[in-house]
Image (tube, rainbow, N blue to C red):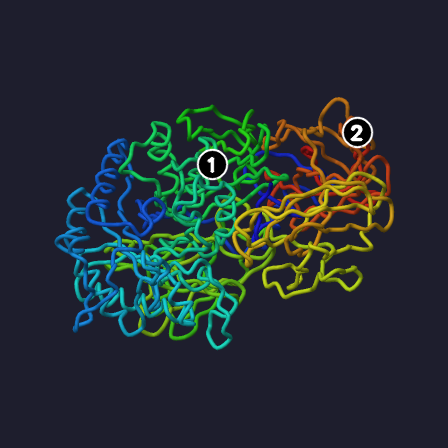
Amino acid sequence: MTWLNSKRGITALCFSIGLSLYGCGGGGSDSDPGGASVAKASVAALASNTPAPAMPQIPVPAPPMGWSSWNSLEENVSYNTIKAEADGLAALNANIASGPKYQYVNIDEGWWTSGQRDASGNFIIDTAQWPGGMQAMAQYIHSKGLKAGIYIDAGPVGCGTRTNGTHFVGSDYAHYTHDFLQFAQWGYDFVKVDFCGGSNASYDPQNAYTAVAAAVQNAYVQTGQQLALNICDWGTIGNNSAYPDYQQGPWAWAPGLAVSWRTTGDIYGPNSGVPNFGAVTGNLAGNYHPEAQHTGYYNDPDMMIAGMGMSAVHDQAHVSLWALSGAPLILGNDLAKPVSAATIGLITNPEVIAIDQDALGVQGLLVGQSGAQQVWSRLLAGSGQRAVVLFNNTAADAAMTVTWNQLGLLPSSASVRDVLAQKDLGNYAGSYTAPVVPAGGVVMLRIGGTDTPATSYQPSSLSGGAVYASCASCAGGRKVTSLGSVVFSGVASANAGGFVQIAYVNSGTQTLKAKLSVNGGLATTLAFPPSGSNGSVGTVTAYALLQAGQNTVTLSSVDSTTAAPDISSIATVAGPMALQPFHATYEAEAASNTLSGGAVVANCQQCSGGKDVGYIGNGGTLVFNGVAAPATANYTVTIGYVNGDGGPRSAQVSFNGAAPVTVSFPSTGGWSSEGTVQVAGVLQSGNNTLTISNPSGWAPDIDGIAMTAQSLHAKYEAEAANNTLSGGAVVANCQPCSGGKDVGYIGNGGTLTFNGIATSSTGSYAVTIAYANGDPGPRSAQVSFNGAAPANVSFPPTGGWASVGTVQVTGIFQNGNNTLTISNPSGWAPDIDDIQ
């Protein structure tokens, strides 16, 4: 099974830049004025940006860690039960010798059994349930060195029901100010605000939670007690066009209001037996909104279910993926009962916890996928630091590989450490392959390498009252103050999506805020912690939805009353490179397709064409017509789909009417998240059909299909002795190249042919070509698979002959040994390092 939502996909063009000093490059001699020395001068003259100097990263608040009562106790909470759980959490923390520990003991629904208020609006508490009241409970939790959390609904009706069948009671607009003030006065540190009552009362999510956040802030002003706010509207998409959150989930508006916000439905229903690992992968998919998680604000895929009956392998995968995501680590297992040594070892592993609690605060990204095998990576604080999870969600153990290119690292030597085993694995150049990733499980790594270079940008324009002021510690000697808006133009990105580091000054003692937007898109609110009382410059980092090419980045004030930091500069910095959103080659809703038996076209905001086809199954059928193939071969087809169920749906997929294969479509964590699966079959040369149906149940909604090329399973060096070089092409030294050499002087008669490229089946293959091009503009080459008509491929500049980039080209390889030829009859091609 494979998991992918609307932020993920397969990149058609992959381009990475490295930096090292050496002298090589095709056409780099005096006879070729387009060579290395001229190219380097041209790049320097054209650049409007500069290498980014190292500046201190200001640590941001880490995601909450603790325990919640819901999974194990449901509404059956009392002083004695919570006291026992607090004792259990304190005992668990004793197993963590150093570093962050679990903090919060969160009391979920069931604490306010009376549902009544006194004449002043105060909660009437059952003193048999809570001797000494809720304040005494908070005091006991604090006495264990822990923090206390409490729960309320945003609307007048709660989620759960009492034993007599009546609903628990929540809050409402009229009581927000009073209720959150009372929580603060009781001494609580955390509050989870549900939305069952809010939904029942037709509250708009953003409007209601904005009022809740204002009440939380008022409580802080009145008491000095800060409540960490957790929004729990399960990723509700606003459906009222009269409100600004129309067709948006909390990830679009909650940063700046809350510490964390739920992105999915509940991961577990109390008393429902052994948890389902499918809920883990479903919530992981629905939680993928990396542009929203930054500077102390966190996507929340729900509390954890480790130690509640899943296998040890699934528990490891669950905890590792939550930590890699930078999610809140809220335990749900019963800590008043004995906990197995294996579970204790997992949930107290200090290296896993350190990755979750990393000071940079960004979300982990999906950087690689092959079927149901995924590679995840998270940018960590510190130079060249990455966390990686190799997730093998298949039924068989398998070897899995992560490349430094996927991580935004140079292909030089990097240290690799097994986080779960807490063991160094050695140094590796270019990539690391874990020999065994268990079926349904993970290998979690920490990698320390060399970042690709960062690029700094100075402001282009100011507006809204923003002005320049002198700043001795700022790049360029000045900063932007009195922030209205500051625009940075020409921000270059080689790929879609990337990390933006913001240099700022906050000389006060309070965290300040500003909004970040890219290319005029939706703005997200960032927090800027104090950077030092002496006017020091600090940085925070956020993942931004940059487009490949040139971008405009804008920082602006939140509003006229919210204090903003002074802005010095921004930089694009190295980090993991996310797979791109699924884009259908053939849309399900296309007029050329055949829909029958009740299948219908519906709106789908996250889908590649804005629509999908639903009601497939139980007689409903979707046929894609006119699926073109260049040759008769085995092809892998990626299907984009939506499945909001808690478990998988299935469908039968048939190529050209052949016997269908049954395909499982895992939950995507909600109907607002998209996933992909892959299925292989034979397509004939020319036009084909692909049929999706389910005779006995519902299939998922289908967005579309895309042809997915297979990958080579080995690297082939350009300088290998079995290759054919002709017409002047020569092997040269190349320090950053994978084998220490490359082939230059390709083109103008020079040709390189890779021989003996082995494949196990005939089909479409995506070949990644590593190359160097020090020209200021692209070079081109013709690439031919097995002597077929060549494709013209553009190779963008790599920023110098001392840098290596990659492009991908797709073609047909036959079963057995194959050739790939690179040439240019009328100009210079780039130098070629290798293919894979």
View extreme (top): residue: 721
Residue type at mark 2? Leu
Q: Is mark 2 on a helix, strand or loop?
A: strand
| Image position of 7 with respect to 820: above or below | below
* Quadrant of the snapshot with the N terminus: top right
Whether residue 111 sits left or right of residue 299 in the image: it is left
Q: Is mark 1 on a helix, strand or loop?
A: helix
Residue type at mark 1? Ala
> In front: mark 2 or mark 1?
1
Label 2, residues with CA under 10 Å away: few <14, some 14-19, many ≥20: many
Nearest the eye: 833 or 390:
390
Of the two numbered discs 2 and 1 on the same chain, state the one appearing first in sequence.
1
Q: What numbered label is drawn on residue 317?
A: 1
Q: Which of the 4 quarters of the picture holds residue 615?
A: bottom right
Nearest the eye: 464 or 394:
394
**Residue 386 visible to an observer of this rendering:** no
The image position of residue 168, as x and y in percent, is: 31, 62
View extreme (left): residue: 132
Q: What numbered label is drawn on residue 217?
A: none
| Image position of 405 with respect to 572: above or below | above
Label 1, residues with CA under 10 Å away: few <14, some 14-19, many ≥20: many
The image position of residue 12, as x and y in percent, is: 67, 48
* Quadrant of the snapshot with the C terminus: top right
> What residue sits 27% from the left and 68% below the top?
215
From mark 2 to mark 1, how far is it between C-alphas? 47 Å
View extreme (front): residue: 164
Whether residues under marks 2 and 1 lie with C-beta atoms below 8 angstroms apart, the answer is: no
Q: What numbered label is drawn on residue 725?
A: 2
The image position of residue 531, as x and y in percent, is: 29, 54
> What residue sits 60% from the left and 56% below the top?
549
> What residue sits 20% from the left and 60% below the top?
184
